[in-house]
Image (cartoon, rainbow, N blue to C red):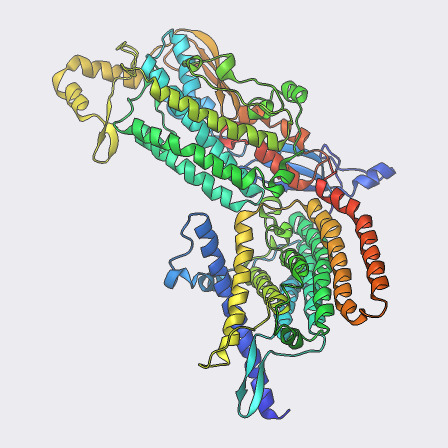
Amino acid sequence: MDWLDWVLLAARVVLVFGALIVSVMLAVWAERKIVADMQTRLGPRRAGPFGMLITLADGIKLFFKEGITPTQVERPVYILAPVLSLVPAFLAFAVVPFGAGVELFGRRVPFQLADLNIGILWVLAMGSLAVYGVVLAGWSSGSAYPLLGGIRSSAQMISYEIGIALGVVAVLMYSGTMRMSEIVAAQDRIWNIVPQFPAFLIFVTAALAETNRPPFDLPEAETELVAGYFTEYSGIRFAMFYLAEYIHTITVAAVAVTLFLGGWRGPVFDFLPWLWPLLWFVLKVVALIFVFVWVRATIPRFRYDRLMSFGWKVLIPWGLVWVLATGAIVVLPEEIGRDALVRWVAIGAGVTLLLSLIAPLLTRGRAGTRP
Amino acid sequence: MAEAIPRDIEGAEVGRGTTAQRLRDDLMVVNMGPQHPSTHGVLRLLLTLDGETVVDLKPIVGYLHTGIEKNTEYRTWQQGVTFVTRADYLSPFFNELAYCLSVERLLGIEAPPRAMAIRVLVCELNRIASHLVWLATSGLELGAISMMLYGFRERERLLDIFELVSGLRMNHAYIRIGGLVMDLPEGAEDQIRAYLKELPHRFDEYENLLTGNPIWRERNRGVGILDAATAESLGVTGPLLRAAGVGRDLRKDEPCSGYERYEFDVPTRTEADCFARYEVRVAEMRESVKICEQVLDSLPGGPVMIEDPKLRWPARLSVGPDGIGNDEAYVRHIMEDSMEALINHFKLVTQGIRVPAGEVYTPVESPRGELGYYVVSDGGIRPYRVRMRDPSFCNLPALPVMARGRLMADVVAAVASADPVMGGVDR
């Protein structure tokens, strides 16, 4: 790498950082507008055209507000927690390819910050680190509601992390790589959502829970826990949690697009050929975020214990089953011809056995035997 | 970190002795309210939590005390209406109705038939409005945020009707001793009729949104159970009692203001949980629509205020360019034409009417249950005592029963299903 590479990398880092901040701004505005429309309200409309600058105005307000630190807090942790929440949210986006790339100064510039060979693991790792911010915020606030929110979210995020991982593992087995750019490349003929639809459902459901979005917004269930883990936060520290949450949402949507919806793939036209993939990518992310918002406007909130039992008794078992099925799908074509019949029967029997073991668990989870 | 305050259920500190006591040290006491998003205003719930399980719940009231009951003792009988209407601010017409019926019984008079019919009409519209607020807020509390807006949207239309009829959106003081302050304005009947046609479709929409929703069912079914025997022994009334299978409804059992003339059912369920209360309330709204339609179909003519000049409120109201106010013709009449009319007006307005000594208790079926007014007169120009039996307050003791041993999230559902209005609780 010469100096030009470094400059280009730095430029991309700054661009992605800025784009994420701006997209959070737009996402918050869009969410408020969409939900308002679904609820026959007008939503924000004063700041800027169509109220688009409302988030900016809110951000500036929060920045200049007094950051009140309650007396009961564990100070260093209390101050560190929002940062711990924000940093992984940004970092996770580093491995997401958001375009096909462009030729600049005679060299190829990929639209991706770091094409790690363990790209997916990086996303999972950053998702797990984000839990620390939430838990420590809840614990260090020295107050009952944040503590409950923190406990809830640690349990919830860890549980649903497994759900996400299972969805990812299926894709990983199907694509045969952990590198994000290669996963996109592997979807040149057909998007993963078609052969991997169950994995897509599992991933998106778990991702909604992972990002604390409704109907899984238990850690901050405002009608129960006031504001959950960030009840005691104000000013810019509160804004950081808010920002982290939305960046997390955008990242999760971007990862889902990369894994299942063909990433930046889409028809490319002659005019500005580098722009089209970027456009398709953004459109797909926006579409997914719209679905998230739609869900929020429609569905009531889960109860905490039901949420956990849904995660452990429905999502994870089905994730496991699907991983097994994916294994069969991947391996069988190679194996066929060599004692094909025997293997088919053996795997079929295995799946049936597993299903029969899990089935009672599932029905019990759904029928709700809890009083 | 948050200190787990070692206290026992009664709130006293626990010594560090036996194992049982040490186990209790893990209990956490949390104040839910008076400033909390889902305690219906300023209800304070003292929760004793074991993890997320509720060990005990104590409702604490008094944060919205307004002194309405006491104030009525220092005002004339007619002024009482404007006080009591503010107590349970989600069902103002019922407060006015119960108060006026009580005073009318002491006076030994009865409102004209047209006034009685319109009273039923506005009360039933009020029941729908109140239940809509309940539907909206309990939807919000369980995370169905859109329901919040839909419920309030419909209620807004009803408030428009109230405004058209009485001049005010809330705290109407429309029902007065001896009748109504004024007749329905022109066009009100058509507007109400048109809206009554629309309402059932709206209810269908909300039921589509909620009734079959698995999360909504799961959050409400089997939650906040209050069986009939417990409910009756606690003095719980209204939808809570009817959801437990007891078909007690004062509109049927002790009809007032001509309720016996209209045909309607009293919806009951037997599950006694939050979902049953939801079903009961939605069904009640549909029944209320039926009652309102019958009232409009059989609306008698005639005056809306008794004729006795010694009792009837002398002033007349009319709609002017800036809304409802004193009728100009009447003001001219007392100021320029008739000295006797002015004297009569002055006496009745400043001194008030005299009510024969005695005491009555008049209950009506408010949206939340039995709303009773115990009114005592010593024969003077002011009430000796006006005591309200407010269903919001009397239903509160059910909360600990519904919440104990359940999760914290169920407390929210249970409180929502009890539908307390703090204005009525604290008065």
Residue A15 in view (yes/no): yes
Given residues A151 and B209, the one toward you in this image is B209
Counting from the top left corner in percent of width and height, residue B328 is at 18, 26
Please state which of residues B190 and A250 is positioned toward the viewer in this rendering: B190
Please give the name of the residue rendered at 70% of the width and 67% of the height, measured from the top-left corner.
Answer: A171
> In the drawing, does residue A134 fall left or right of residue B211?
right
In the rendered view, tell whether residue B188 sits above or below residue A304. Answer: above
Residue B426 visible: no
Residue shown at 42% from the left, 53% from the top: A43
Q: What residue is at 49 percent from the left and 57 percent from the top?
A: A31
Q: In this view, does A371 lie to the left or right of A34?
A: right
Coordinates of residue B172 in the picture (x, y in percent): 36, 28
Image coordinates for residue B120, horizontal then vertical, percent:
40, 20
Q: In which quadrant is the N terminus of chain A drawn?
A: bottom right
Viewer-side residue, A276 vs A333: A333
- Asked if B147 appears above or below A37 in the picture, the reply is above
